[in-house]
Amino acid sequence: MTIRQKLTISFFLILLITIFIIGVFFYSIYNLNEVHMAQKHRYDQIRRVERLKEYNHSFSWIVLDIITDYEKIDIVKKRLDKADELFESLLLKKEITIENSESLEEKENLKLLFLHFENLYKSIRDELYTIVLTKKNEEDFKNFSEKFDILSNKAEKLLIDEISYLQNELDKTEKDRNEFINTIKLEIVVLLFIAFLLSFIISTKIMNDIKVMLDKLNKGVLQLFRDDENSIKIDLGKNNELSEITNNLNSYLEKQDDIIHSREELLRNISHELKTPITKGKFLLENFKDKLEKDELTSVNSVFVDIEELTSKLLQREKLNFVTLNIEEFKVTSLILESLSKLSIDDESKIFLDVDNDFKIKGDKYYLTIVLKNLIDNAMKYAKSYPIAIRTSHNKIEVENIGEKLANDLIYYTKPFTRDPNQQVGHGLGLNIVNKIIKMHNFKLEYIHKDSSNIFSIQF
């Protein structure tokens, strides 16, 4: 299975869990809304039943007022009118109160309650009013009052039972709501933990697989450079992106290897083809040295030397593209002496050597010798006066000569075949070769012009 496929599967798994969590969230909101609506309904129903208590008390006050002022017919009629108003109001509340009951038992209780209210009203309107009109004695009023209290107490008991029932249901709903919220909290926490754990396991597995393959690929690349191989010889399995990259890279390396061999063969052939006519030309020139003037002989010979030097530098520069450095440790004085030994210096007084610190260098001594030799050679070629100075200090070598400041920045001269327009000698390859070798070692080449002197330095 490819890394992309693994990532896709893990993404969809996590997405599925996320969608499930979102679903649980909206399910919770829906249920909490339902619970809220049920609670609101019960609150409203409790308020409705609580108001019915007021009607019961009001009927009791009407009875008390009529019995107290039964001789005042105007007051009695007003109280009866008040009873009529209360009863009409009760009839308006009866339907909505019964409709909002939640169970058959509750509905029957409410019907019975309103029946009691109807009996209370009728007893006031019929029985009590008859007693008032017939002017019966106080015993009749007492008997009526006792009978009325029994009916009122029954209504009161039904009201208390109804309110108690609704309150219990409300408490139960509240308890269920809290339990539901706690359950949802636990479920969401568990789901989030599962999502995190699954993400961690999947990502860790994928990262470990990638790390193992990258470690293998890194070892293969190191082996490629260390053993001078032309392909990465590792097994990364099949059907994964890194194996595809490795196969493509191996194909590229094989093509590059073919190109390198072709270029090396071409350079060898060019070198051979150039050196042969140069050697023949020098040989023929020796035969004509008695017939030619000395200046003419020197001029022609310099042409052959120049061509030979150019060929040598071109070959040297091209080999740097494929070279493997042989890193060793040596002292800076050893590098200086070996570089000087490769130069043909007719007068040792032209060189001033100042070794302040004989530090150690880690690098390829052969190629660093070429670097220092080229810098010394350039310093001697373009010096206005001698001696030139070679100094060492603090992991640095400086080559200094008295001369005009370079017309361009150092980077200009490190490009191949570049030199100042007024420069008549050289091919513009020396500093290019120096810079390539310095970069291969991760050292630094610097240039400054100070006190009429050009100073080239290598920072190790």
Image: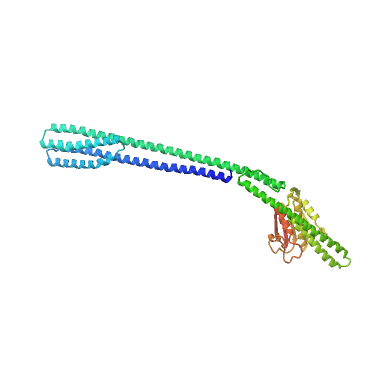
Q: Does residue 283 sit above or below 100 in this rendering?
A: below
Left or right side of 101 for 262? right
Q: Nearer the viewer, residue 329 or 127?
A: 127
Q: Residue furthest right?
A: 290
Question: What colour scheme governs how the chains and residues are painted in the rendered image of this protein?
Answer: rainbow
Q: Does residue 268 sit above or below 42 in this rendering?
A: below
Residue 367 shows in the view: yes
Residue 393 shows in the view: no
The quadrant in which the N terminus is found is: top right
Question: Residue 138, position in %: x, y?
Answer: 13, 33
Q: Nearer the viewer, residue 285 or 277?
A: 277
Left or right side of 272 for 169? left
Identify the image quadrant of residue 412. bottom right
Q: How many marks?
A: 0
Q: Nearer the viewer, residue 355 or 76?
A: 76
Question: Residue 28, position in %: x, y?
Answer: 41, 41
Question: Residue 241, position in %: x, y?
Answer: 61, 47
Identify the image quadrant of residue 309. bottom right
Q: Nearer the viewer, residue 446 or 54?
A: 54
Q: Does residue 260 sit above or below 151 in this rendering?
A: below
Left or right side of 138 for 271? right
Question: Residue 66, position in %: x, y?
Answer: 15, 38
Identify the image quadrant of residue 389. bottom right
